[in-house]
Image: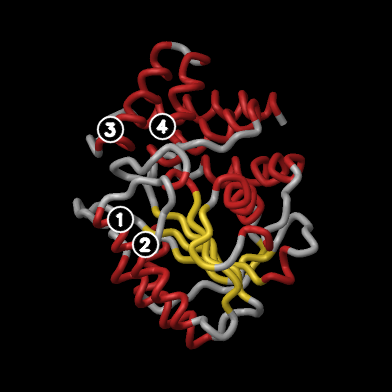
Amino acid sequence: MTFKNIVFSTNDKHQIQQVVDLITKELSNILVGVYLFGSSTQSGLKKNSDLDFLVVTLKSISEDSRVYLTNELMTYSRKIGDNSDFRYIELTNVVLKDISPWKHPAYQDFLYGEWLRESFLIGDISKRDINSDVTIILYQAKSHGLALVGSKEILPVIPFSDVKKAMNEMVSVVAEEVVEDSVSVILTLCRILYTLETKEIVSKDLAGNAVKSYFNPIHKRVIELAIKEYVSGESMVVEAQELVELVNQLKIGIERKL
């Protein structure tokens, strides 16, 4: 597998190849494309960056394949809290007829993410469901994604007006997790704010650095600590009240842009 001008570590290449081999083998009869997107194809992977995959299929994945893919991906993906060389894997599957012709919101057919591991371990499996995040994923994959299997030509062009709708629908849901997943929540909201201003989706650390000057010194410091943990893995220690106050300020800034 070639990655053009993108630089990956040996471990990253191995993990990417594992996922591609898994998908191409298990879904060979219905597979349309596999795409890598996000930090890996834009600003570069940081210490706590995910490997983000988009998979497009001709039809919905069978129940047996859902179980198999989930169990295999749990062995390939880094667990939250582990200090290993593996990366967290996030994989989203969509069915071609659900995204072409394009209409927001779209169905997600299958999803794997590390925040779901506990539910997977007790037997829950991702089901087909409407997910606003599909709009943002397709916008990223079309703009800056790398086709590992298939062609980007089959991906629809996503109007930015739909990206705004998706982000508006996500804000409250994301913000609710601030105490449990503070770094991800803060930097995701920073990225939403940055995207609404620029129409560009960049890495979380770049977005945080771009918008931190909008906030008072206390909130700016919290953003800087979140960036530091995201980039280096050094744990952020912040009072819960500071987190909540920053999230409220981020939400106000986002609402002004919508």
Relative placement, left or right, of 134 versus 147 is right
Q: Residue at position x 62%, y 65% from top?
A: 108
Residue 17 in the image: state x and y as whole percent.
Answer: 36, 66
Query: Marks 1/4: CA distance?
Result: 20 Å
46 or 211, which lies in front? 46
Say which mark, if any, is on residue 12. Answer: 1
The residue pinned by badge 3 equals 236
Amino acid carrying mark 4 in the image: Asp
Q: Earlier in the sequence, mark 3 or mark 1?
A: 1
Classify mark 2: residues with Cα within 10 Å, few (<14), some (14-19) or many (20+): many
| Quarter that holds the N terminus | bottom left
Q: Earlier in the sequence, mark 1 or mark 4?
A: 1
Q: Farthest top residue?
A: 217
The residue pinned by badge 4 equals 205
Residue 235 in the image: state x and y as whole percent.
Answer: 24, 36
Query: Label 4 near label 2: C-beta < 8 Å?
Result: no
Classify mark 4: residues with Cα within 10 Å, few (<14), some (14-19) or many (20+): many
Amino acid carrying mark 3 in the image: Met
Query: Marks 3/1: CA distance?
Result: 25 Å
Say which mark, if any, is on residue 60. Answer: none
**SS at badge 4:** helix
Query: Marks 4/3: CA distance?
Result: 14 Å
The residue pinned by badge 2 equals 16
Query: Marks 2/1: CA distance?
Result: 6 Å
Query: Label 1 near label 2: C-beta < 8 Å?
Result: yes
Look at discs 3 and 1 and give the one toward the viewer: 1
101 or 82, which lies in front? 101
